[in-house]
Every structure is written in C-alpha cells, then in structure tokens.
Image (cartoon, coloured by chain):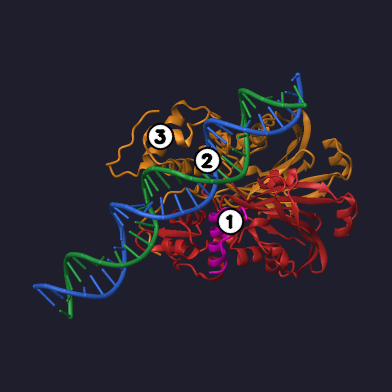
Chain colours: A red, B orange, C green, D blue
Amino acid sequence: MAGEIDRHNGTPIYVQLREILRAHIAQMCPPGSALPSERDLAERFGLARMTVRQAIDALVGEEVIERVVGLGTFVRKPKLDLQVKLTSYSEEMQRRGMVPAARVLSFEQINASAFLARELQLEEGTPLVRFRRLLLADNEPMSVDENFIPAHRVPGLLDREPPTSLYNVLSESYGLVMEWGEDMIEATAASPSTARLLNVDVGSPLLKIQRHAFVARAMVDYSVSYYRADRYKLWVPLQRPGVRPTRNYSTGYRP
Amino acid sequence: MAGEIDRHNGTPIYVQLREILRAHIAQMCPPGSALPSERDLAERFGLARMTVRQAIDALVGEEVIERVVGLGTFVRKPKLDLQVKLTSYSEEMQRRGMVPAARVLSFEQINASAFLARELQLEEGTPLVRFRRLLLADNEPMSVDENFIPAHRVPGLLDREPPTSLYNVLSESYGLVMEWGEDMIEATAASPSTARLLNVDVGSPLLKIQRHAFVARAMVDYSVSYYRADRYKLWVPLQRPGVRPTRNYSTGYRP
DNA sequence: CCGGCGCGCAGGTCTAGACCACTGCCCTTG
DNA sequence: CAAGGGCAGTGGTCTAGACCTGCGCGCCGG
C-alpha cells in the first residue's frame, strides 16, 4: 500500500488514510477483494483503530467498500450502468466514431474565488486544479471546456502531463468515479475570446453547460463548457415524478 | 428531552440516542434551532462524547441536522424536491414562484407535414391540433411554444376555449398523463419573428427545446419551444444520488 | 470418516480522556 | 466610542484501550 501519513501537514489523518485506501483500491483491488483488517491498518500506520474506522466509514458511506461482520472489509463491484452517463468528452466522441482531440489552454493550480468556492461548496481560497481546454471533434472546434477540481482530491496531478481524458485519470489514478451530477443548461452568445477559439462569429449562439459532478456527497468537479450550437445538441430523457427512473442521460452529437 | 437510554435491551446506545434526538427535533425544534451541545448530551445521558457523536453523525448524514464549528448543531430546513421533470409550463413556473400566463397565437387543426409526420411517427396528412402560444412569466415574454397533438387523441378539444394549461386539460379531460419523454436541447439565434414576439434583439441566443412526450408507447405531443436565454435555465439531474448515505452498518451480505 | 466445538480474528460498540481550530462575546485599552 | 485581545464554549480530531457478536476453520472426539 503506497503512501504514508503525514502528521504535521494539517490534513486530518483519517482523510489521508481514506485517500490512501481509495487509491489502493482503485489501482490494485478487484471487486470482492478484502482490505487489511482495521487492526492491521491501525498498526501499519501507527494509528488508533477508531481513526482507521473513521476513514473506512467514509468509504463505506460512498459505497466503495463494504463491511461484513466476522469476515472483513471488501471492495464492492462498481456500478457499471452508472458509469455510462457521466461520460467524459473523449468517451462520448469515440462512441460516436469521431476523432476527439484537445488543445490544452491551461493546466494549473489556483485558489478558489468567491464564485468558485460557492459552486464547489468549499471555502474561498481553497486550492483548485484548473484545467481549460479546447475540445475538437474531427479536427474542428467543438467546445471550450473548463474544469475545476479541489486540489486535495488529486495530489500530484499537476506534476503529470495534462491528461487527454480527465475523467479517466480521475478514475484510474484517484479512484474518483463520477457517480452523479447535475447540469445547468442555458443558451448564450459567443464572447469575442470564445468565438475566436471556437472559430465562430462573435454573438453566435452557444450552449453553456455548467456541471457539478459528485462522488458520494462530495463535489469533485465543477465545469463550465461552451458548445458550438451548430455542432452539438443534448438529448435528455424525461420522466414524470414518481415513475421508476430509466436512469438514462446522454449527450449527443448531431451532425 | 424525552426518553432514556436502556443499556440492557440490546439496541445500540447510539441508535437509541439518535431516535430520541429525532423525536425531539420533530416535536419541538423549528428549523434553525440549536441542539444541546455534544458535551451536554453526553453528560445528560451519561455517555461518552464519541457515542453522542455517533448518534449525531447519523442525523447529519440524513441531512436532518447540521454542524457548525464553534457554534453548535442546528436543525436543517427540510429539503425541497427539485426532481420535477416533464412538467407543464404552468407547473414549472409556479414551482419557480412566478406567475405564468399565455397569449394564444393559434389554436387550429392542420394536416401533418412530412416533417411533423416523421417527428410524431404518423402518416403524412394525419390531422393534428396545433397550439401555438407566447408564454409569459411575471408578465414578461418567456418563450414561444408550439404543440402538435394527434387530433384523434383529443376529440372536441378545438370546440373549447384554448386551455390555459395544456397538460392539465390533456390529463383531466382525456386521461392523457404524460409518462415519459425526451427533450432535444440546442442553442439557436432568434429569428426576426421570434425576436419580435419575445421582445429581444434578432440574433439573441435562445434555448430551443424539442420535446416528444409519450403515454405508454404512443407519442401524444410533439412540441418546439424557444426560450429566452436570459430568462431560462434548464436543470438536468444526471444521476440520482440514490440512497441517502448513512453511517449505518449493514450485516448479512457475502461478497 | 465425520460432526461439533472452540479458538482466533473480523467488525460493532463504547469509554474517558486529550488537544485543536473556530466562533461569539465581553472586557480592556487606546 | 471603537478596535482588539482574551476567554469560554463549540464541534473536529485522535488516542488506547475495553468488551461484544458473528464467522470460518481446524482440531478433536466419536
């Protein structure tokens, strides 16, 4: 198991352990495999068992792992059908037989402004990773995309190359599989800078999509995207309240 | 606070305390009121503070109460359900606390064009009821709305006054309760005629929403709406949070 | 050979403290 | 009167134990 506890960096120990466990699970634990026992973990990291339990409690709450009395703690099967909906741009385009590409506009750490802090439900000034890209499909601009992720969720992300698929990296390296979210959709007119990036006229209609994506109760990603209206439509299945959900949602490209 | 802890009946103490607190909140705590402090509760019930915290943790997980560092623990406002979809315009606006109104632009029978026939999955030339309105919210134009309904579904509809709430009439007079549907969402620029109706500049961004609504397997309504982008945003849940995460521990499952 | 019991280990619950950061408020000081 | 510091109280975190029940397996006796 990689990682060590740093007792002096201010991050609560149980949070550190939780993330160590999450990464460990994501990287080398198939569903059904057992975690070390609470007492083992306590000894290995030099912690009280109650502290270990606090870390494990969190992951159980997220339904990442599962306790069984008398047996141990086990990795749960990821919910496959959930994974399809909150898809990343690259997955989405590949599924549609288009060649996705991206030009990285910025990839840096910033401090949360008042606005971003509110959107991400964090304190103002919290370090965030900002990842801004121009997304292309078949070599033609499709959207300008800006993601904000709490930095503490993705230690070391900025030391890497900017990922080609953000959601893939989040899931494979950090165990952050987006489970649910909400989109705020509106129409807007292209600003000069956005128009230039997307290769459209200033004032052209764009689809603005703000997304909050969550893992368990914690928001992990806030993103703002501007899609070219002439290249992108959304398809949204609806249902009447009280009817059993179909649980489908997909973004769709229409030529 | 009513109730006492029974240390010998087998029910975990924190569960007993949790239910005592829940009852206490339900009976005499308006939203915003404070609970006794953790130390108070521990002393009053003769428990360790960690045990009290476990009870409180559960209620915080249920979003019944809320902790504020340095201040105390407070009763939350019950959450409103935002999960309203496939609602009619009037329901939607009422939910937002606005006064809905409509100006009828046309209310007539037409024959399905090739395009409409394809959208409604009917034969070309099939009689349709066309209902076109300018929808207002708080007396200001919000959208231009056009519904197409197979005429055989709504006999006698045209002999009435144009309905104020289309979905209400469909459901109350014809038993057509929309069960599911799909929205196609895109951004577009206001045409001269639409711009004039909506009281915006030509070329202003609009949200174009095409909706297919179904009862059972049969499509009952095809509609096209143009919403003013400056007045309308769409909220789309991507994936339900599912079960409220709790700190309860399940037993009896074998991986 | 087979059945049952007990041991070891898993998580579940609980205790009685500790120190920390944060908040609101009072009281002192300028 | 205003600004600031101190203080008491809050939740946040952590410790090092305790004893409980549930579980599987191996040992031992029939």
The residue type indicated by label 3 comes to: Glu
At mark 1, the secondary structure is loop
Magenta stretch encompasses residue A6: yes
Return the mark for residue A90.
Answer: none
Would you name the residue on which mark 3 appears?
B43
- Quadrant housing the C terminus of chain B: bottom left
Number of residues whose C-alpha sits closer than 10 Å to that of mark 3, classed few (under 14), some (14–19) or many (20 or more): few
Q: Nearer the viewer, mark 3 or mark 1?
A: 3
Would you name the residue on which mark 1 appears?
A179
Q: Is residue A139 left or right of residue B111?
A: right
Work out whether residue A80 can be spotted: no
Image x and y of residue A254, in percent: 75, 60
Residue in the image at 46% along x and 26% along y: B28
B16 or B186, nearer to the observer: B16
Residue in the image at 58% along x and 63% along y: A175
- Quadrant housing the N terminus of chain B: top left
The residue type indicated by label 2 comes to: Glu
Image x and y of residue B88, in percent: 64, 38
Magenta stretch encompasses residue B210: no
Which span of residues is magenta-colored?
A: A1-24
Q: Is residue B30 left or right of residue A114?
A: left
Image x and y of residue A143, in percent: 79, 58
Q: Is residue A143 above or below residue B49?
A: below
Answer yes or no: are tags 2 and 3 on the same subunit.
Answer: yes
The residue type indicated by label 1 comes to: Glu
Would you name the residue on which mark 2 appears?
B63
